[in-house]
Amino acid sequence: MKRVPIILQMSLILFCVMAVPITILTWYSDKEILHNSENVIAESSLAELNANRRLNETALKNLSQVVAGLNVTKVFDLIRYFETYNELNANYDNVSNALVVQHELLSLNQKTAGVYSSYFYLKDSDYVISTDKGITPLEHYESIDWMEDALARRKGIGGVWYPRKLNSGNTVVSYVLPLNRLSTPTRGIIVVNLQESHIADHFTSSGGGKQGSFLMEADGTIISHTDKSLLLTDGEQQPFIGEIVQNDAKEGYTFHDAGGERLMYTWSRSEQLGWWNVNIYSMDDLMTKAHMLQRSIILLTVIIIFIGAVLTFLIANWFSRPVRELARTVRTRSNIGVSNRNELVFLDTAFKRMQKEEEELFNLLKEREVDTRSLAVHNLLRGEVTKQIYELFPLPYLSVVIVSIDQYREYISQTNPEARSYHRYVFISQCDTLFPDMVHLRTVYQGEGCFVIVINDSCDDFNHSLTELRASLSAIQESAIEVFGHTVTLGVSSRGEFGSGVLNQVGEAMEVIKKRMTEGSGCIFFWAKEADEDNKYMYPTNSERRIVNYLTTGDVPSILKELQVIRQEIQSTEYISYDNILFIYNQLIGLTIKYLRENNINTARIFAGRRDIYSAIASIDTLDEMEDYLNGFFTEIGRYLTHFCAQDSYGERIIGYLQEHFCEDIVFQDLAREIGISYSYMRKIVYELTGKTLIDYTNLLRIEKAKEILWEEPRLTMTQVAEQVGYYNVQSLNRFFRKYEGMSPGSYKAFKHAKSADLSQEKEE
């Protein structure tokens, strides 16, 4: 790209800016068009399927009403007493009565389209009266053994539809209606055989793209299908049909890819008959117009991009003209030494050379502006005395003041680095103006919120010098509040002759400022040698023992009172050192953490929001802050222990209730309300105790019970098993059983009993 002219670079950039969004937009719009088209076609196909289903249900309902109307005519009473074929043919009147029944059946066939045949069978007789073979003995007619299975499916006093295949090879759906005892004393059965092809006509689509349609019973038996070889077979064995049957939705659609072709399955379940109506469409055929529209959009996009490419070249030429002229001017007026490069590379090289020259000049000025006096003071504090120190501090006496910002961690959290740097600059500048003119001093920043002021004076009267020093130090405290927004604590070393040991004076100031822990912040402390201060040591052993006892009982208020006792004991002790105080509180923290871990309490969860506890204690300046910190520390422990105990109590109640009532219809919101907690909190407790969600745990209990029933009571149907474990239907039992056991309930039942049989056989052998 460095050798490509700027006009081509700008053309490429502008082209990408234009082409990439257009390409993405085209891709997205094509994707949305196809997606929305599929959904619209699916909704339309589902609506057509529902209309066909209702049409079929209406036709079947009309047929059943016609048959029921024939039931109440009492025409069958004419042959009520003729139980044998010979009795029926004994005289002309008997035959005439039978012909009347046959005529009524023929009239029924004519009233209803698609009827293949119909017949009447008198209970316990040896003949039938049919429309296809007349009055015929049973031995010369088709077997009626299938009626027992058909009538076993009957619910109520209505008839039942039963798909079957006739001896002639025709597939029919027979409507079987036993005569009603309330309408006639005659006992018999009316059978109307409706052609399967007539039912299939109801599902013939007017549009294209349809690959097949079929009708299934609730148990999966195919009643009607465009492929006649699949009639009366198990429909769930067909591709993707098993997923539809196991779906709880009464109607819907889904898309699948099979053999390189995209297929759409629409289904609708009849509430009256429980039949599944399924249509299969080829989306490749249905989406022809959508694909044509997609190709048109792509072609239009290509045309737009081509036109845009021409425009971008013209725009790039116009915009790059000033840059090219600038590069030409710089080349003619300077000797950069760059050739065979495009305009942007040339200008970039020229500007970098100018920037380099500017930086060299800036560094030269910076070296001259370095504050050598501050550097000399830092060296002095490290024990290095240079010649410049004698120029800075020409007077005979030196003293050191340490200025420490109180609550420095809080100050850091409230300000950014730039603001802190500015505050330090302002504070150091003001410190140089707050002392008398006859005093020489230098202020430097040592880090961690500490400033060091080196004071050089010549006053032989120490008391007079101390009075003036106090006034200046008080002024420093007031200035610090204005600059930092925080108070400062000052530690003042002893006053010594120049050269007697500045390092010792720094150590004195650092040591004396530790009095802030016991006496509070915002004070000025002067170094004074304490008598026997190194021999004093104390530790509140009794308080430590009581705190452990209070932790055992969870008595947080008593722990807080004991902390006040420890503080009072520290304040009442003379010459107690800062290190002694930190040791006391570090021991209390360590003892508490040890107690929690010995009692298997997760300290990481309690202190997750706190930084390193020991570092936090080391950064605390005063006993007030220490007490506040420890109050929060122990209060947090108490809150966690209370929550931990309460959670265990709630968990026992919840788990116990689920294990006792999982076979019932449980309303989890009502259960949570009865216990006295929120539903979300109840779910969290169950998950922490079991590692499973509330729903999964309940379903797992039900499946375990179902396994027990399948083994102990093998004669129960799957519907009965589902009801006993709390499911409304077999589909739910199948779905969750597969989820947790990897197989269907029926397969599990067969597997367990086969295994039991093998074990029994092995024992016999």
Image (cartoon, helix red, strand yellow):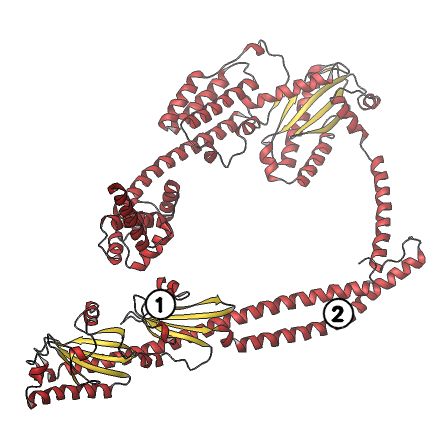
How crowded pointer 2 is (Cα within 10 Å; few <14, some 14-19, many 20+) is rated as: many
How crowded pointer 1 is (Cα within 10 Å; few <14, some 14-19, many 20+) is rated as: many
Secondary structure found at label 2 = helix
On screen, residue 591 above or below 349: above
Asked if marks 1 and 2 touch (Cβ < 8 Å), the reply is no
Q: Is residue 464 visible?
A: no
Q: 514 or 541, which is in the foreground?
A: 541
Under mark 1, the amino acid is Gly
Q: Quadrant of residue 532?
A: top right
User: In which quadrant of the rendered image does the N terminus lie?
Assistant: bottom right
Q: Quadrant of residue 481?
A: top right
Q: Disc 2 designates what residue?
A: 312
Q: 604 or 69, which is in the foreground?
A: 69
**Label drawn at residue 235:** 1
Horizontally, residue 614 falls left or right of residue 214, namely: right
User: In which quadrant of the rendered image does the C terminus lie?
Assistant: top left
